[in-house]
Amino acid sequence: MVLSVAALAQNTGQTWAERKCVLYQRAVTDATKMIGRDRLRDAFIKKNQEFITGGCLTQGNVCPMTDGEFEFANLLTVMTMNEGMASTFVPFGCRDTAGE
């Protein structure tokens, strides 16, 4: 029997939204190791952590500005899609870059 990702989330006692956030946080850890922390600005990491701390509910407020950050954002988009999430799940967007 093959279970959908949403069904697997239910089996762990988590909602699908909660499970996606856990998967995203794990993907961030893996992507950071692959890309290298030194290629990511502190403001970028802070905004991404705020997304996770907030339950992965806000959208489009983590703005990649460097080559490393674009590589990180692209990698995370692919990683989350491989876990069954839509490409719109990730928080990357540059609506308001004030203070970055």
Image (cartoon, rainbow, N blue to C red):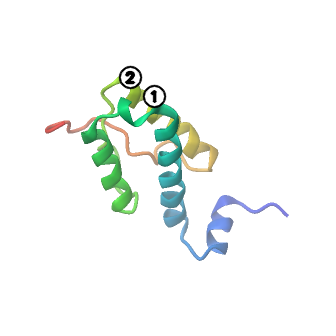
Residue nearest the viewer, comparing 66 with 82: 66
Q: Quadrant of residue 73?
A: top left
Which of the 4 image quadrants contains residue 51?
bottom left
Label 2 CA crowd tier, 10 Å (few <14, some 14–19, many 20+): few
Q: Where is residue 97 in the image (x, y as percent from the top left)?
A: 20, 36
Name the kind of residue labelled 1 in the image: Glu
Above-or-below relation of 59 to 73: below
Instruction: Check disc 2 and report the residue beneath it.
Output: 67
- What residue is rendered at 55% in x and 46% in y? 80
Secondary structure beneath label 2: helix
Q: Which residue occupies the extreme right position in the image?
A: 1
Relative height, residue 13 to residue 78 (above, below): below
- What residue is shown with label 1? 71
Q: Quadrant of the C terminus?
A: top left
Q: Residue 36 carries which label?
A: none
Closer to us: 7 or 99: 99
Instruction: Report the quarter where the N terminus lies.
Output: bottom right
Spatial CA distance of label 1 from label 2 is 6 Å
Q: Is residue 76 shown left or right of residue 41?
A: right
Image-based side of 90 in relation to 5, left or right? left
